[in-house]
Every structure is written in structure tokens, then in C-alpha cells.
Image: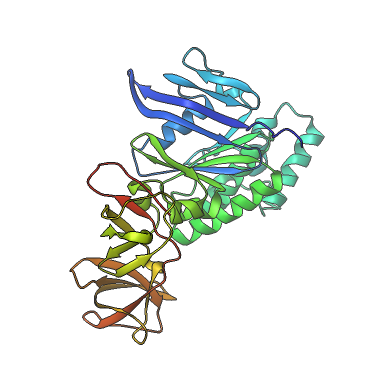
Amino acid sequence: MPEPQPPLLALDHVDVGYNHEAVVHQVSLELREGLIGCLLGPSGCGKTTLLRAIAGFEPLMRGEIRFNGGAVSSARFTVPPERRGIGMVFQDFALFPHLDVAANIAFGIRGWGSAARNTRVKQLLRLVGLQGYDNAYPHELSGGQQQRIALARALAPQPKLLLLDEPFSSMDMDLRGELAREVRRILRAENTTAILVTHDQHEAFAFADRIAVLHQGRVSQWDSAYNLYHRPADRFVADFVGDGTLIPGMVLPDEHVDTALGELDGALSQSLPPGTAVDVLVRPDDITIDNEAGTVRTEVLDKAFRGADFLYTLKLPDGLSVLCMAPSHDNFAIGDHVRLRLDFSHLVVFSRGSGVDCPAS
């Protein structure tokens, strides 16, 4: 069998900080060539600082960053950003207002021959769907068009890795999702490896193959979107990714769990002895409103219309509440009593009382 290819980018126990105080702690992750990664987390979690360290704008306090087969950062040295072969798209696009679209795209390939440069500009304009805009100026473009030109400019030198720092944050919600999917298509067409920084999980899900969830400067989980949602590594990921509620339970024999929803049955990936107090993650898609076959009686406390669905907040018999997604053609009123049918395909539980998160899914 052929030897596995080394990752294009590898971070090994990286610390980054300011004034001798680390704000990013012990980050280790790898990204293979052709994949799209994402650094996801709330404001202040260290994701932009980490991205800047990958770009070469921030030195490391500890650890090492390897890119394209060689070390580019450690506590002892830093390869300058311009020598890394890494492109970057900034939050404000940073287009040059005095240059037209063609000149903006060509800015990073000024050393190319005239014919090759013009061919590359035309190719990228076709790729981003803005043929004929060669002579337009940035102020004549919409926000989405400016975003595409900024992307084309960053792709022009054919970087091995492209970094995107919250590039969709100034867009409205609908345009952000659309642009994330379109930018992903463009990166795929160019076979460009990329890393996106965002605080928006929907944007991350639409864009990335692998997502690092950051919390207080540490990576809680580096995984696929599916596993982040269905197999969160800790309570923070469970709470930050997707909607859900943690309800108390008790482990019973045969890996059943007793909760206010009844006795839940799901294979646990680790052995938890009977009598262990746990918290069980309940996603809105784990339960279904079914007034005929449902076994748990609840009261509608709140509802949020989401077009095809309502997101209901339902009060359980013990007073706790859970979230449930239901088709909007069933329009229950606040105060109505409805019955729930359990649709757990797996369980995610965390032990209580020890202070240690123990996921099982």
C-alpha cells in the first residue's frame, strides 16, 4: 500500500499569546491537502489569533507549525508571511479603491508575464461569476461581488493554503450561507486547501470538511460537522453546536438511562456503572410530537416559527424543558398539552458530580 501523504498543515502543541501570556493553549491539529477546515468559536476564544499565527503574523510562545513539508513557526523562529505561500482574505476585503477589478485581482501576480497575468485574471473572473467586470471599481460592486473579487485576488498566485478571517460577517444571514457554499465551490474548483474563521456554526457547516471548536483558547474538538453535532466531546461543544438541552438521568443496568422523558435505551461507548448520575443531551430531532403514540405528556411553553418548522419549548412533568422541532402545519398554541414520542438513535451523556466530562454516543 502507498505511504499516506503527510498533512499540508500541522500544528503541534501550539501556544500563542501577548505580553508573555498565552491566549491560545496547546493546539494540535492536522489538515490534509484539498480539505477545507474551520476555526469555530465565540468571540475572544482565540480563533483569529490562531489564524494569524498560521499566516505568520503572530509568533509562537511554544510548539511548532509545519506547512507544506517544513517548519514555518516555532518559539525560536518565524518564516515571514510573504515567504509562506499562504493567501489570506480579510474581514473587510481590503480591496484597493483606486484600482479596477482586473488590477485588484492581478496585484499579487505582478511579476507574471502580461499574457499569463491577463489569462489568470480572466479565468478567475469566470470562476467567481463576474465576467465583464474587469474595468469596474470596488465602489461600484455589491458586498457579495466585492467578496468574490477579494477571493479571486487571494487565489490569483495559486497559494497552497488560503486563510479566511470572518469574510462573510458583514453580509445578511441569507447571503452569508449562499456565499459560503459558493466560495466552497470555487475553492474545490481550484483544489485549494483553506481555513475559515467564524463564530457562526451554520456557516461552518456549509463550508468546512473539518471544524475545530475553540473554547477559552483551547480546541475542544477537531472533527466533522456530523460528529460535532451527534458526538460532542464535551459539554461546551454540546451546548455551542446546535440546539439542545441537558437533562439529568441515572444509568440503569443494560446501559439504559432513567430520565424525565422515561427510560432511554442507547449503546454507550464507555462502560458507566449502574447508579452513575449523568446529564443526557436532548436534541430537537431526538423527540417527536405525536399525540396518538406519544408516551410523555408535556406543555408548550414557547414556539419559534422557522418556515417549514416550529421550534417548540416544551415543559416536562418534572418542570424541566426541552426543545422539539415539528412541521409547521401542526400549529400548537402556547399552553397546549402535547405528547412526545422518543426518537433517540444514540445517546450522548456526561457524568455529573465529578467535574469531568465523559461523553458517550
Q: Is residue 322 toward the left or the right of residue 29 in the image?
A: left
Residue 189 drawn above or below residue 21: below
Residue 107 drawn above or below residue 231: above
Q: Quadrant of residue 215?
A: top left
Query: Which residue appears farthest toward the front when viewing the image?
Result: 253
Q: Is residue 206 toward the left or the right of residue 290 in the image?
A: right
The residue depicted at 44 percent of the width and 61 percent of the height is 346
Q: Quadrant of the C terminus?
A: bottom left
Measuring from the top left, give residue 326's x and y in whole percent: 39, 76
Q: Is residue 244 visible?
A: no
Q: Which of these two is toward me, 87 or 28? A: 28
Q: Quadrant of the N terminus?
A: top right
Measuring from the top left, give residue 51's x and y in whole percent: 48, 33
Q: Is residue 312 toward the left or the right of residue 197 in the image?
A: left
Q: Quadrant of residue 110?
A: top right
Query: What colour scheme was applied to this rendering of the protein?
Result: rainbow
Query: Which residue appears farthest toward the left when viewing the image?
Result: 319
Q: Is residue 29 visible?
A: yes
Residue 118 drawn above or below residue 182: above
Q: Quadrant of residue 161?
A: top right
The residue depicted at 30 percent of the width and 60 percent of the height is 252
Measuring from the top left, give residue 231's x and y in whole percent: 44, 52
